[in-house]
Amino acid sequence: MDSLPLDAHLIEKFLFTMDLLDKAGAHLLSVHDARLKVKAFNDYVTDADVAVEHMLVESIKKRYPYDGFFTEEEGEMAGSGGLWIIDPVDGTVDFMNGYPDYCISLCYRENGSDAFSFVTAPARGECFYAISGQGAYLNGKRIYVSDIESSKGLILMVPPHRRHEYLDDFWLRMRSLYEVFSDMRSIGSAAMSLCYVASGRASAYYERFLHLYDIAAGLHILNEAGGLVQLDVKDGIYDVSAASKRSFESLRRITCGC
């Protein structure tokens, strides 16, 4: 996507969003024993997911009434202005179990182009963000993808935990990738996984069956940090192969056969 100019209008929206996400993150940290609802097989939502999404959407609507939304819990809400793509808690199972790699993921687009994105992990005290054409940052410090070779790097992989019929194929690809990378991890959040690659904590990331709200912000941050991505999309569902420039071809050769 093309870069947008960094004008006063976008700076104001960026700063408003940063402050709003601080408040939403504080809410998540204050919640204990959140009530749980099962949406589908191995797919959960808590009161906190719903509360944070409501907080974000209503605050943004009040400030920018003409903007539209695409969110995990409410879906698409059309508008004539910009588009806010929001996952209120990416890594709900992490959140339910007290594992700190859950996050709030938000990408703001204007005229079809990413303007800025945030992935904030309140339990870690970390805020990843990107501004189109201005780079990617972690807590204010510029970040870049790793430059180490694949054989010394980590790959983040998440099994298809809601699509167990694809597990056999996943294990085969995992075995092949073990011949390329030094070790593997799974942190349970697509947005955080992409940010870990963007910041050099991992060399690559592979996951299937994702939605736009899972990945929009993380992809923008990774792109601004110098990473590469292969997206395979079918009926609005994404398979993601993302890596540093040094690891990308090895990853793509195994995950997409290209």
Image (cartoon, rainbow, N blue to C red):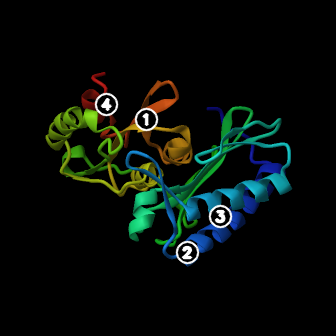
Q: Amino acid at mark 1?
A: Val
- Give the labeled residue for mark 3: 21
First of labels 2, 3 by sequence position: 3
Residue shown at the point (47%, 43%) measured from the top left:
226
Instruction: Residue 13: give x, y in percent of width and height.
Output: 77, 54
Q: Is residue 179 left or right of residue 256?
A: left
Q: Amino acid at mark 4?
A: Arg
Q: Nearer the viewer, residue 202 or 231?
A: 231
Q: What's the CA distance linking mark 3 and mark 4? A: 34 Å
- Give the labeled residue for mark 4: 252
Q: Are marks 3 and 1 in contact (CB under 8 Å)?
A: no
2 vs 3, front mark = 2
Instruction: Residue 245: give x, y in percent of width and height.
Output: 37, 39
- Give the labeled residue for mark 1: 229
Q: Are marks 3 and 4 in contact (CB under 8 Å)?
A: no
How crowded is the residue under tag 4: few (<14 C-alpha within 10 Å), some, or many (20+)?
A: some
Image quarter for residue 30?
Answer: bottom right
Q: What's the CA distance linking mark 2 and mark 4? A: 40 Å
